[in-house]
Image: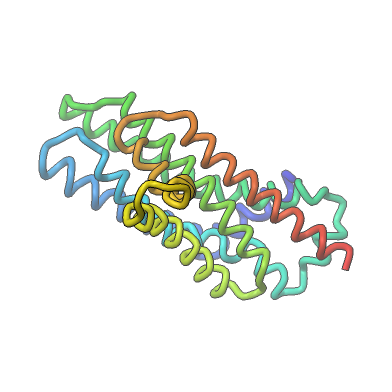
């Protein structure tokens, strides 16, 4: 797994992908922070992290679109499948590399707390809760994008599919609000990423919401391993 992880990390920074992702992430997070907190002189970061939800839905596919699809396109997936590394190790190495890049972007948001400290209005506990929610969201979206990437050899299809899946999960909450109380409404709200994420932006660390994102990531990782298992025995 370490070799796969190092290989993927190297790929992110020998190609423009890692730099572009971090540059765009820093730009939008800084833009929302400046517009909300600095210009309005407030320490409330809830709107900053709420806005980053949509940005992540569109931006994380940039990290995941090539994870598996590139191997199929270059016909190097069979080499990986016959390499002396377990399938879980192969998948986790790629997944953790993508999640590391995302965590680098999220970790840089600690600078917001430093800047707010100089203004005398920093709330580090609230910032930690916001960042925990964003990391959990990123973990789930990264795993979902990796699974979609494993199903195709086209990076464009993988990226569009990941964005479409993310938008559907956003729309699930809107669709639920149009329904009367019932089973389908509860199901849609339960599947909606935004309904689970919004509580983190309100300063509430709700364990079931954290479990939802972690479970989603675990299921997507498991399914990705199963996709590779089927390909190995063909």
Is residue 50 in view from this perspective?
A: yes
Q: Is residue 6 left or right of residue 52?
A: right
Q: Position of residue 202 (x, y in %)?
A: 29, 34
Residue situated in front as seen by the camera: 163 or 15: 163
Vertical relation: 203 (above or below) 93: above
Q: Position of residue 178 (x, y in %)?
A: 32, 56
Q: How is the image coloured?
A: rainbow
Vertical relation: 168 (above or below) 185: below
Q: Is residue 17 left or right of residue 32?
A: right
Q: Is residue 163 left or right of residue 3?
A: left
Is residue 20 in view from this perspective?
A: no
Where the N terminus falls, by quadrant?
Answer: top right
Residue situated in front as seen by the camera: 216 or 1: 216
Residue furthest out toward the left: 40
- Quadrant of the rendered structure where residue 111 is? top left
- Quadrant of the rendered structure where residue 42 is? top left
Vertical relation: 206 (above or below) 33: above
Where the C terminus falls, by quadrant?
Answer: bottom right
Q: Is residue 110 left or right of residue 153?
A: left
Q: Residue at x 52, y 40 (%)?
A: 212
Q: Residue at x 49, y 40 (%)?
A: 136
Q: Position of residue 141 (x, y in %)?
A: 51, 52
Q: Residue at x 80, y 60 (%)?
A: 80
Q: Disc count in the image?
A: 0
Residue situated in front as seen by the camera: 81 or 220: 220
Q: Position of residue 153 (x, y in %)?
A: 66, 73
């Amino acid at each position: 797994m370490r070799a796969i992880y190092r290989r993927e990390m190297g790929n992110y920074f020998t190609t423009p992908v890692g730099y572009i992702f971090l540059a765009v992430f820093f730009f939008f997070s800084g833009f929302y922070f400046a517009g909300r907190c600095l210009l309005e002189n407030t320490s409330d970061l809830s709107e900053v992290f709420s806005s980053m939800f949509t940005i992540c839905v569109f931006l994380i596919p940039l990290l995941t679109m090539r994870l598996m699809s590139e191997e199929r396109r270059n016909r190097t997936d069979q080499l990986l499948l016959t390499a002396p590394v377990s399938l879980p190790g192969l998948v986790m190495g790629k997944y953790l590399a993508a999640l590391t890049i995302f965590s680098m972007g999220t970790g840089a948001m600690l600078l917001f707390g430093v800047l707010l400290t100089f203004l005398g209005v920093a709330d580090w506990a609230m910032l930690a809760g916001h960042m925990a929610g964003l990391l959990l969201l990123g973990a789930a979206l990264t795993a979902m994008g990796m699974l979609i990437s494993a199903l195709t050899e086209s990076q464009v299809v993988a990226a569009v599919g990941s964005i479409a899946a993310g938008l559907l999960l956003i729309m699930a909450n809107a669709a639920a609000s149009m329904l009367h109380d019932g089973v389908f409404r509860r199901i849609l709200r339960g599947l909606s990423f935004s309904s689970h994420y919004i509580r983190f932006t309100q300063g509430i660390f709700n364990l079931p919401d954290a479990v939802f994102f972690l479970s989603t990531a675990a299921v997507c990782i498991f399914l990705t391993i199963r996709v590779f298992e089927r390909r190995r025995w063909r």
